[in-house]
Image (tube, helix red, strand yellow):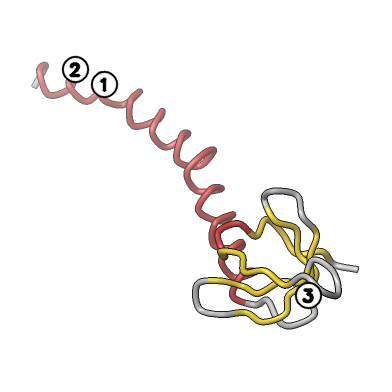
Amino acid sequence: MQGGTSMLTSLLPLVVLFAIFYFLVIRPQQKQAKQHKEMIEGLAKGDKVVTTGGLICEVVKPEENFIKVSLNESVIVKVSKEYIAKKINE
């Protein structure tokens, strides 16, 4: 019995540390990634977005892997969905 109890008490701090790490780091990152994915999937024509490069542009046409965006009236480019940082709410 003595060996089983000491094994449990030696593993308990590791379990507690993992639980703290999960709730402070892993879970919030998963939640943020889910919200970002939902935001990307919900983009529609006319939405204003900011890219990770800092460009502010307007969505012209969402596609499967890319999004066509307009930088100004005459410049339309394709941006990978991964590089859309956030949507601007006006």
Q: Secondary structure at mark 2?
A: helix
- Quadrant of the drawing holding the N terminus: top left
Residue at x 68%, y 76% (from the top left corner): 43
Q: How would you rate the neighbour count of disc 1 (Cα within 10 Å): few for under 14, some for 14-19, many for 20 or more?
A: few
Residue at x 56%, y 80% (from the top left corner): 63
Q: Secondary structure at mark 3?
A: loop
Look at mark 3 in the image and give the residue it sits on: 47
Q: Secondary structure at mark 1?
A: helix
Front residue of 22 and 5: 22
Look at mark 1 in the image and give the residue it sits on: 9
Under mark 1, the amino acid is Thr
Residue 18 locus on image (x, y percent) = 38, 33
Residue 6 locus on image (x, y percent) = 19, 17
The number of numbered discs placed on residues in the rendered structure image is 3
Query: Alpha carbon of mark 1 to alpha carbon of mark 3: how far?
Result: 55 Å
Q: Are marks 2 and 1 in contact (CB under 8 Å)?
A: yes
Front residue of 29 and 17: 29
Under mark 3, the amino acid is Asp
Give the number of the disc on residue 6.
2
